[in-house]
Image (tube, rainbow, N blue to C red):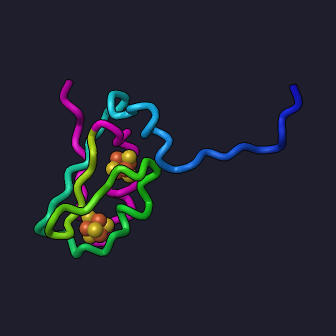
Amino acid sequence: MAMGLGCTARPGRSRENKTGSWRVFRPVFVHEKCTRCGMCTTVCPEGCIMEDEEGLPVTDYDYCKGCGLCAEECPSEAVEMTKEEK
Ligand code: SF4
Ligand code: SF4
């Protein structure tokens, strides 16, 4: 079978495959520090960060794979990665 060069992976693919079970670290959003800038929502590769009724970020742990990008890119250090307890 012929294959094209390169490949693509669209964000939010885990909607078809719950990747939350892979997670080793879990992001915890510290709303007191959050400025609602939306950066975490923008960078999340799984598209699983949403806003609550107050415009604060919350993640869907069924799909969050714990990559830590949201914590890495948050300008307010409002996301803490904590070890997952299983
Ligand atoms: S990136 Fe940080 S400050 Fe911005 S919305 Fe997300 S948690 Fe809040
Ligand atoms: S750790 Fe953050 S950026 Fe990574 S999948 Fe979970 S919510 Fe998205």
Question: In the picture, which quadrant includes the C terminus?
Answer: top left
Q: How many marks?
A: 0
Question: In the picture, which quadrant includes the N terminus?
Answer: top right
Q: Nearer the viewer, residue 17 or 74?
A: 17
Residue drawn 40% across and 44% down? 67
Residue at the left extreme, as displayed: 32
Tell me which corner region of the image, top left, top right, bottom left or bottom right, holds residue 24. top left
- Left or right: where 63 falls relative to 12: left
- Left or right: where 1 falls relative to 83: right
Tell me which corner region of the image, top left, top right, bottom left or bottom right, holds residue 40. bottom left
Residue 79 forms part of the magenta stretch: yes
Residue drawn 61% across and 45% down? 9
Q: Nearer the viewer, residue 36 or 10?
A: 10
Tell me which corner region of the image, top left, top right, bottom left or bottom right, holds residue 70. bottom left
Camera sees residue 68: no
Where residue 46 appears, x then y in whole percent?
43, 47
Camera sees residue 15: yes
Residue drawn 23% across and 33% down? 84
What is the magenta range? 62-86
- Left or right: where 73 falls relative to 62: right
Residue at the right extreme, as displayed: 2
Q: Main secondary structure of the magenta part?
A: loop
Residue drawn 22% across and 75% down? 35
- Left or right: where 12 falls relative to 41: right
Where residue 43 appears, x then y in whole percent?
44, 60
Q: Nearer the viewer, residue 1 or 82?
A: 1
